Image (tube, rainbow, N blue to C red):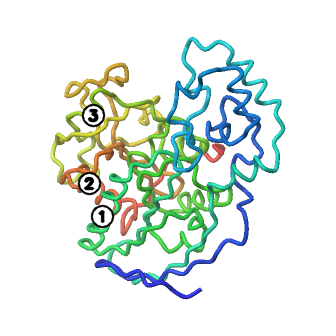
Amino acid sequence: MSCLKFAVAFSTACISWIAHAGPVADCPLKEAPFSIDSPVLDVYLSTAAIAVVEKNWPGVHEVWPALTSTTVPTFAAIVTLRSITPPEFQPLQRLDAELRALPITDADRQVRCARYDDERPRFTIERRKGPTVLVFEKITGFRDEPSVTAARASFSEMARRRGWSLVVTDKGGAMTPAVLDQFDVVVWNNVSGDVLTLSQRSAFRKYVENGGGFVGFHGAGGDPETFWPWYVDELIGARFGGHPMNPQFRDARINVADPSHPIVAGLGKGWMMNDEWYSFKNNPRSNGARIVATLDEESYSPGGLAMGSDHPIAWTRCIGRGRSFYSAIGHRPESYSEPSNLRLLEQAVEWAADKGGRQCTGPNRSSIP
């Protein structure tokens, strides 16, 4: 295929695509039995499975009408039947048993794998003084287009100003050693849903563990249910618990928790901003994370989602020889023009790139799949 010129103010990249020859074969849940722990999307894609659900749970569509879409991106990709059933729902175990008794057909395998891709880009990048950055935007779960677009624009401006070489892709096929080896940092821009095949997962994990950088924010750690334990438990280090509603967006104070860390240099003691505030099921500090910023729960009302006086909102982790940064800030598009948040993200990329810095060392739980 001919090379496509991708000309922008901060970099010039020549991108060619190697078209994937056929259906994706190694999607993670291809052979998984139907169950109450399957993505609701996979249940809804099967006539037999949804018939079992409707028999045991009449009116399921009215309870969660937003889950009826089987076209990705869809919220149905990031929840399970177990997670959406009300407490009073009785026949959960019977439903699970009946779902597990269903055979997995070739048609089931085909539709499960259809949301993955193996389109493999080749980048020829104009090298500049700063790090090479790949912004990854494949989303099969919840996609908030305004925030994704605003974040992309902000990272493009950072790249222009800081001398980064930056390209953007929404293709899981970019997660191959040949592509990843060209980049110092991979930024997951509000990525939601299970987006990588088994071979892509393996390539990305090896990239990080062998010294690559990862920066994720907001939606990249905000799925109610995840289906890749290593990503959520090791790379991110905490599982999403929820966020307040009514109102969804609230003013809150962010406190700098580790003033010695270069990611929060110049941010003083903290700042106020308005956003959607995540709480987590576990504190990443107990999972080996270095917390750089916390949320002051006295400055807003977390309701039943309170984490207490230690409510991490941004942190780093060492993954083998690699560096991981995650910030839960960033639902509102305005978050990507807020000066303190932009500084946090910009310095996170440069820290994760490890340009001339000290080696990042820490626990590497290789047993997590």
Residue name at image x 55 percent, y 42 percent: 69
Labels 3 and 2: the sequence-earlier one: 3
Q: How many C-alpha atoms fall within 10 Å of the one at disc 3: few (<14), some, or many (≥20)?
A: many
Q: Where residue 219 sits: x, y (%)? A: 42, 46
In the drawing, what numbered circle is on residue 153? 1
* Front residue of 164 and 24: 24
Give the SS element for disc 2.
helix
In the drawing, what numbered circle is on residue 295? 3
Q: Where residue 274 sits: x, y (%)? A: 21, 39
Residue name at image x 76 percent, y 50 percent: 109
Q: With respect to residue 38, does 212 lie above or below?
A: below
Q: Where residue 279 sits: x, y (%)? A: 38, 31
Residue name at image x 60 percent, y 55 percent: 196
In the drawing, what numbered circle is on residue 336? 2
User: In screen coordinates, is 11 left or right of 102?
Assistant: left
Q: Quadrant of the C terminus?
A: top right
Labels 1 and 3: the sequence-earlier one: 1
Residue name at image x 33 percent, y 53 percent: 146
Q: With respect to residue 35, does 185 lie above or below?
A: below
- Asked where in the image residue 97 lies, by quadrant, the reply is top right
Q: With respect to residue 182, does 172 lie above or below?
A: above
Q: Amino acid at mark 1?
A: Ala
Give the SS element for disc 1.
helix
Q: Amino acid at mark 2?
A: Tyr
Q: Closer to the observer: label 1 or label 3?
A: 1
Q: With respect to residue 154, does 301 lie above or below?
A: above
Please report contact status of discs 1 and 3: CB closer than 8 Å, yes or no: no
Q: CA distance from mark 2 to mark 1?
A: 9 Å
Q: How many C-alpha atoms fall within 10 Å of the one at disc 1: few (<14), some, or many (≥20)?
A: some
User: In screen coordinates, is 330 left or right of 367?
Assistant: left
